[in-house]
Amino acid sequence: MARRIDVNGADGVRLAAWEFAEAPEAGRRAVEVAAHGRPFVPAQAEPAEPVGLPARPERLGPPGRPAERSAGPGPSAGVLLLHGLMGRASHWADTARWLSGRYRAVALDQRGHGLSEKPPRAAHTREAYVEDAAAAVEQLGLGPVVVVGHGMGALTGWQLAAERPDLVRGLVVCDMRASALGAASQREWEDWFRTWPVPFATLADVRRWFGADDPWVDRPNPARGEFYAEVMHECADGWRPLFEPEEMLASRETWVYDAHWEELAQVRCPALVVRGLDGELGRAEAQEMVRVLPYGQYAEVADAGHLVHYDQPEAWRAVVAPFLETVLAP
């Protein structure tokens, strides 16, 4: 189950945060498949109090100070999950439900994504994304938190950890590069968006195109098709993305031209760098990132591409679980 909690982000942008709890096994299929066979995403769920979580957020004090504990039962250590560019909070659903057995897991629809507000292009700055994440931690009483980020969400995570060490006690960086990617990379993305055959007639067409027909696909990948099916919504003329491609390009251009090693070196909490063996983050760069991080660790997942937690969910959990247990030990 998931319930929505609104957060006021930078400049008053409204953000949708989703708090997850493990769905009962017997009813999971009914939860995950909505009417007309559409896949469950939190945006389509009715807000509800999740099972096994306190009715009010548990507020954790900064290191060295006692926590203000709520009277209700349930996990207290917080985990904030940040999706990548074009993603949404529901991409973390399986991970968040797994985490909810021991921790308080919250996934954020970042600005311009999911059900969060879609501000103008100029509002998609690195500073705004980081301030949004800080606002979520503070307003939901999660801190000090472990931030688990994928792609762009990982960059937001390590920039937050560098700027606000009081809010972050641990960091998981999933398949995000610290090196500058440059103008050629941005042009490739612009060209790629123009190849999308939108609107798609059905969700099956979405899954087929992104899983097999997309010119960026080296070999068929059903998980990739499912990933993109979750960011589509039904319009009068077919299925279109929840986001505006122009806004995604505007967001990307705020970090694609710069290297981010300096911010990485300022992260003073334990950090785990995870890469898919066939992902966008190469092994040499990942290991250099670990070297630059003051308390860095390294893990890789075989048979996974950029969408590590989607491609190989069990292997993903296997590398993340020991890190979380260490960082969030009572």
Image (cartoon, rainbow, N blue to C red):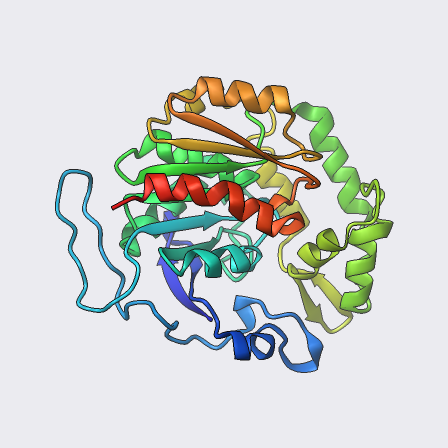
**Residue 89, can we see it?**
no
Residue 268, by quadrant, is: top left
Residue 43 % position (x, y)? 53, 68
Relative horizontal placement of residue 209, taking residue 275 as reference (left or right) = right
Q: Residue placed at 47% from the left, 71% from the top?
A: 1
Q: Residue furthest bottom?
A: 35
Q: Residue placed at 54% from the left, 52% from the top?
A: 112
Look at the picture and state if 212 lies above or below 21. Answer: above
Residue 195 % position (x, y)? 83, 47
Tell which of 155 and 278 is nearer to you: 278
Residue 58 % position (x, y)? 24, 59
Tell which of 139 and 320 is nearer to you: 320
Look at the picture and state if 186 lies above or below 19. Answer: above
Relative horizontal placement of residue 256, taking residue 138 as reference (left or right) = right
Relative horizontal placement of residue 157, taking residue 164 as reference (left or right) = right
Look at the picture and state if 148 lies above or below 297. Answer: below
Residue 328, by quadrant, is: top left
Q: Residue placed at 48% from the left, 77% from the top?
A: 46
Tell which of 251 and 169 is nearer to you: 169
**Residue 45, can we see it?**
yes
Look at the picture and state if 235 lies above or below 212. Answer: below
Residue 163 % position (x, y)? 34, 31
Residue 251, by quadrant, is: top right
